Image (spheres, rainbow, N blue to C red):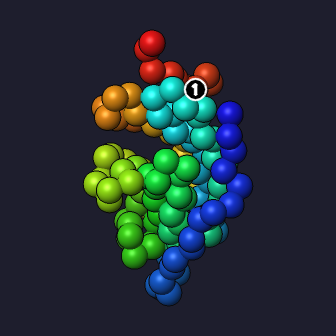
Amino acid sequence: MKVVAAGFLLTGVSLATSAAAPERVQFTGTVQQDGSAPVALDLQLPSRQAATLRLSDGSSLELATPGSAASPDSARVRLVSPSGEVMHTATIPGAGVISTSFAYLVCKGEVTYISPAPAVSPACDA
């Protein structure tokens, strides 16, 4: 299993601090695409920030914490194809969210989103 440790861009905006907003949000998840090895991530983003993780196939995973320009009222996870098509968007409601776990399974172009993430990474049927 690959682990994403770097290769992300942080973007953020300066917004008024909310008493309910946590200092950071923990994103834990996997992306499994067809027969390739699953990509695992465990990333903390500061409050009011967003990050884009570029995957080896050219697709990307966009993460946003509550208060960011990308997701002002909730945390957000978005899977985007190499061509820029949004394949799936998950919104995690609440300005006070401190962690979320998820798994994406992409088999023959069909996307399955699972949250919370299962203990064992899902795989495409052979």
Q: Position of residue 30 (x, y in %)?
A: 56, 38
Q: Residue at x 62, y 24 (%)?
A: 119
Q: Quadrant of residue 85?
A: bottom left
Residue 114 visible in rendering: no
Q: Residue at x 58, y 26 (%)?
A: 121
Q: Is residue 89 above or below residue 124?
A: below
How many discs appear? 1
Q: Is residue 96 above or below residue 55?
A: below
Sort mark 1 into few (<14), some (14-19) or many (20+) by Cα contacts within 10 Å. Answer: some
Residue 29 visible in rendering: yes
Q: Is residue 11 left or right of residue 44?
A: left
Q: Position of residue 65 (x, y in %)?
A: 50, 64
Q: Which residue is mark 1?
A: 121
The residue under label 1 is which amino acid type? Ser
Q: Is residue 27 above or below residue 21?
A: above
Q: Residue at x 69, y 44 (%)?
A: 3
Q: Position of residue 62 (x, y in %)?
A: 46, 59
Placement of the N terminus among the 4 image quadrants: top right
Q: Is residue 6 left or right of residue 62?
A: right
Residue situated in front as seen by the camera: 64 or 86: 86
Secondary structure category for the residue under label 1: loop
Q: Residue at x 32, y 56 (%)?
A: 83
Q: Position of residue 48 (x, y in %)?
A: 51, 73
